[in-house]
Image: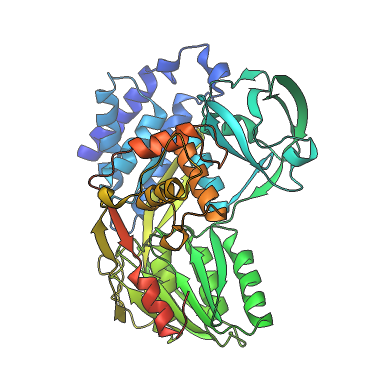
Amino acid sequence: MKQKFISLMLALLLTVTPTFAENGAGAEAENNTPVISPSRQESIIREFAHTLADNYYYGATDQNILYNVICATIENGGVFDLDKALEAMIISLNDDYAEYYSPDSYDEQSQYYSAEFFGIGAVLTVKDGGTVIDTVYTGSAADVVGLKPGDKIMLVDGTDTSNMPPAQTRQLLVGDEGTFVDITVLRGEELINVRAVRQKVTESHSTMELLDGGVAVIDIDSFTGSLDGEFDSYLEELTSKDIRKVIIDLRDNGGGDINAAISVAQKLVSAGLIAKLKYKNEANNENIYSENLNAPNLDILVLTNGMTASASEFLAMALRSRGRAKLLGEKTYGKGSMQIMMRTPTGSGLKFTIGEFYTPNDERVHTVGLTPDIPVSNIVIPVDESQFAEIRLDKLNLPASKKGVEQRLNALGLLPDSAVDGYYDAYTEAAVRIFQQNRNIEVTGQVDFYTAFYLNDWEYDGLTKIIDVQMEKALEYFGANN
């Protein structure tokens, strides 16, 4: 009886409520929102409800999902809205890892995880409330048309961006591959008009640094589509230089694309079972294997902490379970679940949990985490502002003033201890640029009066400084010094 009532209510709401009523008749063209008939909307709701009920790992029913759709409509003043209904479905799961994405948010997420998008190839920053080009990638569309760091973007395809923040400006610059974008920039007092062709831009979310003593540190801050190729290049360089000691830093890495983690694991682990993926329908369970007959002979140490989660935990789990690595640091977060993202006809997206990953021995990671083989915690100490050297605003070139600047940048976590020496170098310049960007000061990398003034005036009480004991112990493990 309850199921029949829910079906009747859903059909009634979709019949008597205008499609996207809150947008008005003229909003469709302005917002580019597709017009979907009431009958098609009902089909979409039922299809997605059924998909969730069939695939959500922890269990859900069509009946409960549709009931939440009706409640969301009632709370919306009785006006049915397809996207609000889809969002209500996700909320009904009561899952911290299930999310609804607006069309713009879905596009941003997709671009982030693929690490690829089509744009002009420039890093943007903020200045005077507007958008300024900070870096131009060599060979990019921006480079080809002569755009330079410091150019303020005034117009994009006729839209005034003079007071627009970088995130909004970026949305205008990104588009389909091969399409043109007209840009007007202010360089000094000159307005310059250029037309650029959008090209593929790939963002990196990993780095490799070679240290003394034949040790390599591979820092992965997120698992994205670009990691596969990046890791191949890392392995080629390690082989060419005969480096066998490797630290993989997964601290504060919240995960990302699990397929990227699987790919890296398969490169490092010799042939055999590396993990198990379990789904609601047990018939769909998968065993993940490596077919690598020539796995590199590396001594691997993986750094973890409480924010090492999801795909990061998968890689750490896979390497340790096959005896390819030891874990050093702190217990991981304990997110061993996997989510899928689905796009809806309105352009929005739904993310929900479809399964969990386990070790080859059926040990669960979700809610449990991974306990390190070598437990090490970093040291956290309060910042003592009384120990800072004085910044003489009228004499910024004094060694004491320079050291005072670096001490403050160090306290803000922008400069390593080793760079606090009273001499400005590339580390100092990079830290200054970040500080200037965060404070909406003109980004130059140079310590001018305003930069020094803001650094001097900053409230440092309550800040803490982290001594990276974990990296120190990792280097000691390999008998190396940084």
> Which of these two is toward me, 274 or 430?
430
Quadrant placement of the N terminus = top left
> Which residue occupies 27% across, 70% down?
377
**Residue 268 drawn at (x, y percent):** 54, 80
Q: Measured along the vertical axis of the image, is residue 117 above or below residue 169?
A: below
> Is residue 43 placed above or below 325 in the rendered structure?
above
Residue at (25% x, 47% y) in the render: 94
Position of 107 compared to 311: left or right?
right
Q: Position of residue 103 (x, y in %)?
A: 49, 34
Res 25 visible: yes
| Camera-side residue of 250 and 393 | 393
> Can you give x and y, in whole percent of width and height, for residue 401 in the image?
43, 45
Identified at 51% across, 28% down, the residue is: 165
Image position, residue 271 (x, y; %): 54, 86
> 335 or 380, which lies in front?
380
Q: How many labels were placed on the picture?
A: 0
**Vertical side of 378 occupied by 359: above or below:** below
On the image, which quarter does residue 452 sit in? top left
Furthest residue toward left: 1
- Give the residue displayed 40% in from the left and 72% down from the top: 471
Q: Is residue 346 left or right of residue 276?
A: right
Is any part of residue 440 visible from this angle? no
Q: In the displayed structure, does residue 50 sit left or right of residue 171?
A: left
User: Which color scheme is applied?
Assistant: rainbow
